[in-house]
Amino acid sequence: MADRLLFTKTGRARYISHLDLMRTFQRAFSRAKIPIKHTEGFNPHPFVSIALPLSVGFSSQCEILEFGLLEGTSYEEVPERLTAAMPEGIIIHRCWPGERKLKELCYVNYIMTFDYPEGRPQETESAMTALLGRESLVVKKKSNKAKAGFTEIDIIPLVHSWRMECQSDTMMVDLVTSAQNPGLNPDLIRSAFCAENPEYTPDFVTFHRRDVLDGEGKSFR
Amino acid sequence: MMNRTLEHILPKVQKPARYTGGEYNAVVKDKNRVDVRYALCFPDTYEIGMSNLGCRILYGVMNQRPEVWCERCFAPWGDMEEALRREGLLLYGLESGDPIAEFDIIGFSLGYEMAYTNVLNMLDLAGLALRSADRHDFSPLIVAGGTCCYNPEPLAPFVDFFVLGEGEEVTLEYIDLYRQARDEGWSKEEFLMEAAKIEGIYVPSLYEPVYRSDGTLEEVKALEGTSELVTKRIVQDMDKAYFPVKTIIPSTEIVHDRVMLELFRGCIRGCRFCQAGYAYRPVRSRSPELLAQYGREAIENSGYQEMTLSSLSSTDYPDLLPLCDELLDYCAPRDIGLSLPSLRADTFSMGLMERLQRVRRGGLTFAPEAGTQRLRDAINKNLREEDLIQSCKTAFAGGWSGVKLYFMLGLPTETDEDVLGIADLARKVYFTWREYSPNKARGVRITVSTSWFVPKPHTAFQWEAQIPVEEYQRRVNLLRDALKRDKSITYNWHDPQTSYLEAILSRGDRRLADVLEWVWTHGGKMDSWTEYFDYQRWLDGLAACGLDGDFYAHRERPRDEIFPWCRVSTGVNHSFLWRERELCYESTTTPDCRSRCSGCGANKLLTGGGRCG
């Protein structure tokens, strides 16, 4: 099984896309002089794979990267050496040999923060409660595969649990969603909320991935 | 570093990583502990600007100084520009996120004419007045450097001063002068007068063009106490010059996403149409030992999987094969690709081919420039057909199955025979493939590309007329018809609209500044991108300013023409250029600089004895 890294992606690094991030890791391993396994085939390149793609602009403290450490480097020294070779905003916390299959990664915990710098309307809380309390909430989701350019997806069954914390100018939703097959991008909740309640459209919404969880709700590593 | 408004904008624009900074090796200093803040601006997108080796060199040179903080700034794409304007954000330096209007100096790199409107747009996005005369504060000073500055006139009213030639030394010299001026409270005018005394600095406000009634120049008057001729700067010893082995590695893909190893500056060939070939003289090489070391260090510091050797004509590097061998010993076991652009078709040897094949194989491109020997001699391309065919033979026999051939249409003295000669040459290349390819089942791709010749300042053809567009189109059609039946040959030709504008701007005078401003005011920007380019807008701009584009593009100049760039010297004598032009009309070649010195004058730029190499 592949080796794994746990890293955060915050600050300016939030805007690095999934593909660019993989390329950044390939180069960073090389800069840090940490030899890693290459793919086989006609055009071999360093193998890296990110467990769950993260939308551009989201921050995360629980990203998992899979790769193959070659002899000569200990797991313990990888985080510090690799972090030093990374662009600002990416910090590697742990490196370990993977023992569980990625498909055991079932849930993702997101923190969604709705910003109302001019003051939060009281009703936003009940509006969100009503939205997430529905039996079903079918929304359109952009898709490059579908002919129409979008597919339909029901948000509700993909939301495992949620709780809310409201302040005078923010509404924070602590959300556990399905991670894969299919996963749920929490931005769909934002857009559904704004479509249903245009008068409560926040100034901005930030998304933070706090943890990835297994079927029992424990941190997946 | 990033403010809230920017955070709101970024998720909504294309490729936001272009606007954040924070890349590996980006230089972040404490702004309270630096004395001069410099914004190095590239008037095109991040992907293009970050691929520019010159900018990486200057960034490194400046940031080596602890008291100077140089940051980068690129032209935002339309969606980002719109967002910046909507939110009232000013153009900012990528490293700090601070508005560049607060900086001490703003330096633009000018590589091609079609980026001029972006200079104006970036000044406006920065919140600055476009014209130097309207910027009354001492700072920020607006500086421009790069190849286009050998004719600074079209941008003269917008720029406080231009830097001619290589910037490694002069940049630090004017920064030092700036600090003195600021600390002693000089006025902007006092500073510019003093800056003009630094070799290589052209202050346009100290020169005044005087026109005749027919629109030609009577003179470019040098104001009292100003030097008559400003000569470009060069680095004397390439082995002592700064080379960026530890440089920014973008977190998003750029155009040249690889290690660039600069072999030498200048070119020994003397092609008569080539501005770079004259303007970068004299030839100065780096030692192969140093290059091999730089190459290894640059790979280790970057993590790149690809390296390219860069120069105007890499096969003219004297130690190319040993250098390739040494680099390949390092690259091959690490799966690092080595590529070599700028190959001359007469020097592509078996030895070189084998070396390039050891790692990955790219396409092969040759630029014969003209279809017949007579015209190639006239432009001094000094490439013989036998040698081109021999090179193709080597390549095809070695398994290459595609060759790109670049030509120009409208070169001085070109006839229909020369145009049809391009088709003949392409066919000969095809027959060479038929004869020597070991694997014909794969087929062959021969691509012929033609551009419309643009006469450039400081070349032997600076007096020439660009042929009229109808004539260019006729020659394109002639060649297209001649190649119609050859299914293995693809013909591409360059659209004439930008070439016409390049011809106007590259030899334009100061009056064109009004056209630039008109075009920008009417929405012109990113003119090298088809998404934004609007030809009609430029024609309207010329008309609105009462200027005739053909006067600049299609007029042959007499020998005693006063050029707009007459106060600027590349070190190459005008008398030498005129002689080269006359030799063109005799179809007589001039030997390359290593075979025999032709006395162009550029060796006088070398302080230590004046030998080019």
Image (cartoon, coloured by chain):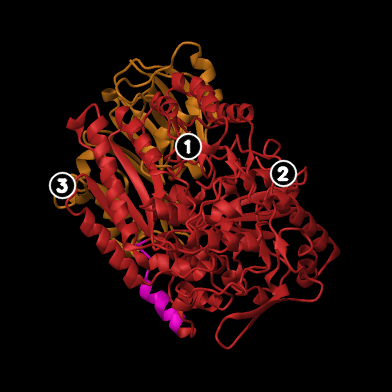
Q: Amino acid at mark 3?
A: Ala
Q: Position of residue B609 (x, y in %)?
A: 77, 43
> On the picture, is B227 further left or further right than A26?
right
**Residue reaching furthest top?**
A71
Residue depicted at x 71% and y 40%: B237
Residue range highlighted in magenta: B530-543
- C-alpha distance separating marks 3 and 1: 36 Å
SS class, disc 3? loop
Q: Position of residue B79 (x, y in %)?
A: 40, 61
Mainly helix, strand or loop, the magenta region?
A: helix
Tell me which corner region of the image, top left, top right, bottom left or bottom right, holds residue B153: bottom right
> B523 or B259: nearer the eye?
B259
Do dots 2 and 1 share one subunit? yes
Q: Position of residue B597 (x, y in %)?
A: 64, 46
In this rendering, the answer to whether B407 lies above or below B516 is above
Label whose residue precedes the other's in the sequence (2 or 1): 2
Q: Chain of mark 3?
A: A
Q: Which chain is orange?
A: A
Magenta region includes residue A177: no
Residue depicted at x 33% and y 70%: B471
Residue depicted at x 75% and y 47%: B67
> On the picture, is A149 further left or further right than B385?
left
- C-alpha distance separating marks 2 and 3: 61 Å
In this figure, which residue is indicated by the disc labeled 2?
A: B236
Q: Chain of mark 2?
A: B
In this figure, which residue is indicated by the disc labeled 1?
A: B258
> On the picture, is B38 further left or further right than B487?
right
In this figure, which residue is indicated by the disc labeled 3?
A: A146
